[in-house]
Image (tube, grey):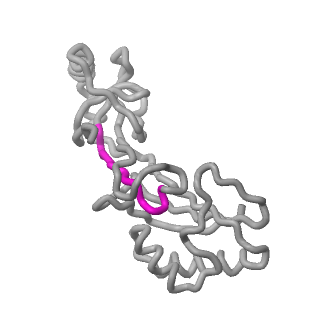
Amino acid sequence: MKEIFEIGTWVGTEDGYGQILYNRPLYVEEFTLATKLGKKGELDRVMYICKVFCSFEGKVKSKFLVRNYTSVQELSKKEKGLVEKTKSDNPERYKEYITEEGKEILLRQVFLTYKVEDDQVDEILEKIRNISKALKPFFTFKEFVKEFKKNEMPFSYQDFYKKGQSYIRSEVVSLRFDSILYATKNKESIFCSVVAVKI
C-alpha cells in the first residue's frame, strides 16, 4: 500500500505548497466498477484535500484555496526551508491562513447511468425522490441499495453502464450521488444525497 500523508503535513500540490486538511483513501466499491477495474475492497486511490499557502516561489496566495488532489509530493529540504521563510516573513498572512475556514464546498459526484424504457422515466424519478427522503442525511451505497430494493424499481441497481460499454440511446437516467469533502468510513463512501436525472 502506498504511503498516505498525514493530516497537517506540508506538501507540494499542482497549485503550490500547502497543508493536508483531509486524506481520503477511496476503495473499490460496487458502484466504482462502473468506471474502474479492480476488486471490491482494494485501494483505488487517495484523495487529498489541501489548503494552499504559497506559490513554488514563496509568494503568499491572495486567496487560500482549498482543493482536492489525487497526487501530492513530499517537500524537499529546500522546499521546507522556503515554506518556513515565507511563514516567518509573512506572520499576519500565515495567521490568517491558519485561522481562515475554507469557504469552498468540495463535492465528489458519482454517476451511475441506466438505459430505461420511455414510459418508465417519470416513475423512476419519483421513486428515487422517495428513496432519497427515506435515507439518513448521510448514507453508504449499501444503505441506498437496501432502500432501492424496497421500491420495486423497473431495473436492477447493478445494471449500470460500465466503462467502455456502449448503448443505443433511448431514454437514459443517471443517478447522481453527492459526497461532501469525499467523506469515507470503513472503506465505504459516505453520501449526502442521491438524485435521478434524465439525460
Q: What x and y, as percent, mark residue 197?
A: 66, 65
Is the residue 108 above or below the residue 4 in the image?
below
Q: Which residues are magenta?
A: 20-32
Q: Quadrant of residue 158?
A: bottom right
Q: Is residue 26 magenta?
A: yes
Please name the predominant secondary structure of the magenta segment in the image.
Answer: strand
Q: Residue at x 35, y 38 (%)?
A: 50
Q: What x and y, as percent, mark residue 2?
A: 28, 38
Q: What x and y, as percent, mark residue 93?
A: 30, 28
Q: Residue at x 43, y 27 (%)?
A: 14
Residue 89 appears in the figure: no
Is the residue 68 above or below the residue 80 in the image?
below
Is the residue 69 above or below the residue 133 in the image?
above
Q: Quadrant of residue 23?
A: top left
Q: Quadrant of residue 66?
A: top left
Q: What x and y, as percent, mark residue 5?
A: 25, 38
